[in-house]
Amino acid sequence: MGYREQVAEGPLGRWMECAWWLETASPVRGYAVRPDGCVDIVFQGGIGLQVVGAMTRERRHDFAAGSRTCGIRFHPGMAGTFLGAAPAEFTDRTVALADVWGRPARQLEERMAGAPSMDDCVRLLRGAFPPPERPPDSVQRAIEAMVAAHGGVDVDWAASQAGLSARQFRRRCLEEGGLAPKHLCRVLRFRRACALAGGGVDWAGVAALAGYFDQAHLIRDFHEFTGATPVAVFSKTPAAAMG
């Protein structure tokens, strides 16, 4: 299996995290995709374009030999500006982009299906999401600060950055990102722990660096988000973050 990412740059980089490609030479079963707080737009031949909402649990996918899949991943809280729909509608769901955009999505699917290479597919997909003319709003900027801190912020502080009460911010964060603020912070912390994990992992050290109270706290989140312990998760085939 080959998985690649290309970080978004320039004006689009504030809104979009990356474009990515996944190609399989042989069949793959149970490919794990972990929660990361993001919304993705995914294209796969024979299926078309889909919106993959923010996830609350790991998902597993099977791919046939010769499968080609590509996508773009928005930073948490940023996808709604491009979709014209609240990301809360897609949490833990996969929805055809044509159900959101209608004819423009079907036309984009046709062009991507006829593209000669994965690079061309990605170019077409990225071109369909130009940077907005306006900057992120106050709620998106507060979510941006939460992401920069890997979830290690006080939610009341984040609400104050958006100029809202904690209750108002919870509602708006859920609308804009698909997850409530505390839940998003937990997912961001979990994502940070996954990024810090490597060979010969010192899980107590990872827990401390990722902002957990202790190793037991980290293990509880891994159980909730993946159904397994950190050791079990990282003894399996490498996973990707999507959704």
Image (spheres, grey):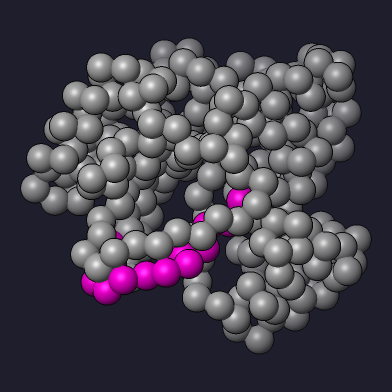
Instruction: Report which quarter residue 158 is drawn in.
Output: top right
The answer to whether residue 222 is above or below residue 71 is: below
Instruction: Report which quarter residue 64 is drawn in.
Output: bottom left
**Which secondary structure type mostly characterizes the magenta part of the structure?**
strand
The residue shown at (45%, 59%) is: 61
Where's residue 159, x and y in %? 81, 23
The residue shown at (70%, 56%) is: 225
In-image side of 79 versus 47 (left or right): right
Q: Is residue 22 magenta?
A: no
The residue shown at (82%, 75%) is: 204
All told, the count of numbered labels is: 0
Where's residue 155, x and y in %? 84, 33
User: Can residue 182 be seen in this snapshot?
Assistant: yes
The answer to whether residue 183 is above or below residue 128 is: below
Q: Residue furthest bottom?
A: 200
Where's residue 28, x and y in %? 37, 70
Where's residue 101, x and y in %? 36, 18
Identify which residue, 167 or 165, lies in the foreground.
167
The answer to whether residue 145 is above or below residue 65 is: above
Instruction: Report which quarter residue 199 is drawn in.
Output: bottom right
Q: Which residues are magenta?
A: 23-35
User: Can residue 148 be seen in this snapshot?
Assistant: no
The answer to whether residue 107 is above or below residue 60 is: above
The residue shown at (26%, 30%) is: 127
- In the picture, the quarter occupied by the N terminus is bottom left
